[in-house]
Amino acid sequence: MGYLHIDICVIRSGEGKAYLFVAVDRTSRFVHAQLYRQITRHIAADFLVETLQALSYRVHTVLTDNGVLAIEESS
């Protein structure tokens, strides 16, 4: 436990674009997901903090696919 996989994908609907943040623990299969209307560094950091607070154990490694998704600067 402690390997956390995180990914972000774009969801398009009739209401516009949204961003789905998903975190999955490799061993326990714990899943934390959140949908946001915008994507910023602040939102990404908040999602990670919320995910870590929801877990009852320590995460030692955060894994991503190193995908390229433009994250806007917080204003």
Image: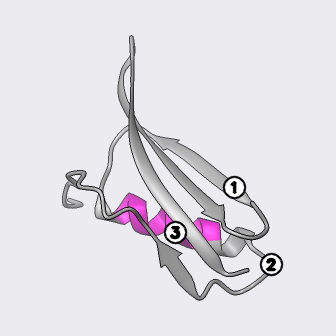
Let me know if residue 9 is in the magenta part: no
Indicate which label's residue lies in the foreground, 2 or 1.
1
Q: Which residues are magenta?
A: 42-51
- Label 2 – label 3 distance at C-alpha: 14 Å
Q: Name the residue rendered at 67%, 68% in the picture.
A: 26
Q: Secondary structure at mark 3?
A: helix
What kind of residue is marked 2?
Answer: Ser
Q: Position of residue 47 (x, y in %)?
A: 51, 62
Q: Locate residue 33 relative to residue 44 in the image: left or right.
A: right
Q: Which mark is residue 56?
A: 2
What kind of residue is marked 1?
Answer: Val
The residue tagged 3 is 48
Mark found first going from the N terminus, 2 or 3: 3
Up/down of 45 relative to 67, above or below: below
Q: Secondary structure at mark 2?
A: loop
The residue tagged 1 is 31
Let me know if residue 47 is in the magenta part: yes
Q: Position of residue 41 (x, y in %)?
A: 30, 64
Q: Residues within 10 Å of mark 2 (few under 14, many from 20)?
A: few
Q: Name the residue rendered at 45%, 55% in the picture.
A: 7
Q: Locate residue 29 relative to residue 37 in the image: left or right.
A: right
Q: Position of residue 8 (x, y in %)?
A: 42, 50
Up/down of 1 relative to 22, above or below: below
Residue 73 in which image quadrant = bottom left
